[in-house]
Image (cartoon, grey):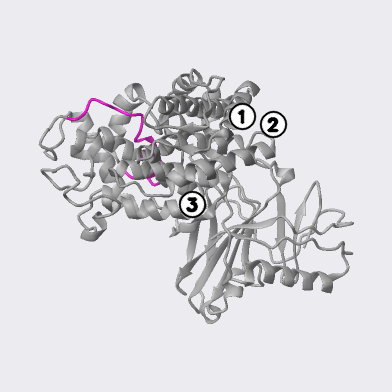
Amino acid sequence: MNLTCTKQRLIKMNTNSFHLKKSLIIFLFILCFGIVSAQIKRTFLHPGAMNGQQDLDLVKAKIAAGEQPWLGAFNQVKTKAKGGTNALKTINSNNNDANISKNDAIKTYANALVWYYTDQEVYAQQAIALLNAWTILEGFNAGFDQDKLQAGWIGALFGPAAEIMREYAGWKHEDMEKVQAMFRRAYYPQLKTVSTWNGNVDLTQIDALLNIAVFCEDEAEFNLGIERLRKRNPAYFYMETDAAGSRNYGGSNFTGSWYSPKLLIEGLTQETCRDNNHHAQYAMASALHAAEVAWNQGVDVYTENTERYTAVMELMATQTLTGTMQGTCADNVTTKDLLDTWEVGYNHYHNRKGLSLPNTERLLKEKVRSQGWSDWNVFHETLTHGEISPFIPPLSYLSSVIDTNASVITVKFTNKLILPENPVGFEVIANDIEMLGITSIKMNSTDSGIIHIYLNKDVLFSDVISISYSGTDILAQDSTILNPFTDKLVEIRLPGAENYITVQLKSKSWDYLLRVAAFHSTTKRKSPTVTEKHFFASSMESTFWWQKRNIWSL
């Protein structure tokens, strides 16, 4: 859950005005956290479409160190990072307009990536020039579903490119708003209506829709993309346990539109037997792209589709490695076409989650990274997502692991107020405090030992991680449950390089909830240095924030 505090600007206070301070604290917290029934607007994380900042920074470091396969893939992308544009007012997806717009979309995404990885101004300028030029686009006019597919193909390139360029200080805000307006005007009409063609088209639409929605900060379109993905999954990727009716969606008619498979096994797709995995590769890539965008925004659709997506990846990898369709189709020869995909799914399920995907791993190492080609919305996944993420479960799916043999990392415990040196002249400004995430773990009274609380990469370097607990006797009091700043605070900690927080638990006389919240300031900044981080301390009577260079408190 993402909660954004109502913006407040408090008055200057004398540090001795304790009672006034306390009253203002309570009032602010009620405004921020107490009204749980209200509609909460999503807070979008940037950059957070296809590429998260931590992933971008990791690849940047790999390239700088000359490591493979990233350097080789980067050099390929760099050849595509060219200037010049052929922007169109309308796109007829059924003629050469399709190739013109495709080429510009490729150049834009390539320039955005190369700029971020190298900090070279020329690539930023080229990316911005391309994006700005395409603000003249009014729409697509072929008049049939090829427009939906074209908008998906190029939107899944223009969208993440624009999201990366948010970080570029030289992009005028009014120009960025024109690009957002163009996306809403020209792309949304094509992306928000489900194509009834083969399922790869809908999945490509969803890929583009989510990327663009993040850049535009359009919550309705983001939610629509997630909803559509969840509906399309059982209608495209076969699972024996799926309800029969769920396979009939958006033009899919099981098994009539599934191209007469000879064998129904998990991992089969609606288009497996259409052309023996040519189109199925695009569909798999698009679904995993969509899941990655969702993940970067704190929405986990990966977990609910673990069996589905990994079965598809492994079966398709086996079919590609062996050259046979494993008896699934009348034509038993696998397509020779090989896209630079599998990387996004493998990175999540293997590197983040620790699952074994032996055939996918072998395919990536033996063929994809050396022979896979990028086309349309499948764009150099080896560069952007190859082997980039450590095992970090998301905060919204926080898990507890009791391990009496775990090594205790450095954790600060306090129940007294810690003041900064020379606490004079505090200016109290609370208008940029934001709750990044909050969740709870149900604990039994007998639980004891060391608990590891894993954090998502997006909150790992947030300003404050707060942990508190409550007894089951107050579970009905929502404002109390959601407010981590209570006299029951058991631990506070500045997040560091570790991907988990360690807490020592003692058995209690009641069952309780362990609550975890992450906070940060919405003031724009990249990974803060130690002196720039906000330090947090709490007592049973007062709570404050402190920033060393610009002191402010609650």
- Identify which amino acid the numbered label 2 is placed on: Gly
Q: Quadrant of residue 527?
A: top right
Q: Which residue is mark 2?
A: 170
Q: Which residue is mark 3?
A: 222
Q: Residues within 10 Å of mark 1 (few under 14, many from 20)?
A: many
- Which of discs 2 and 1 lies nearer the camera? The answer is 1
Q: Which residue is mark 1?
A: 128
> Which residue is drawn at the image coordinates 66% and 71% (left, top)?
486
- Give SS at disc 3: helix
In the displayed structure, does residue 518 sit left or right of residue 243?
right
> Which residue is drawn at the image coordinates 78% and 70% (left, top)?
24
Dot 2 or dot 1: first in sequence order is 1
**Marks 2 and 1 close (CB-CB < 8 Å):** yes
Question: Which mark, residue 95?
Answer: none
- Give SS at disc 1: helix
Q: Position of residue 418 (x, y in %)?
A: 76, 60
Per the rendered image, the range of residues in magenta is 334-356
Q: Is residue 177 above or below residue 500?
A: above
Q: CA distance from mark 2 to mark 1?
A: 9 Å
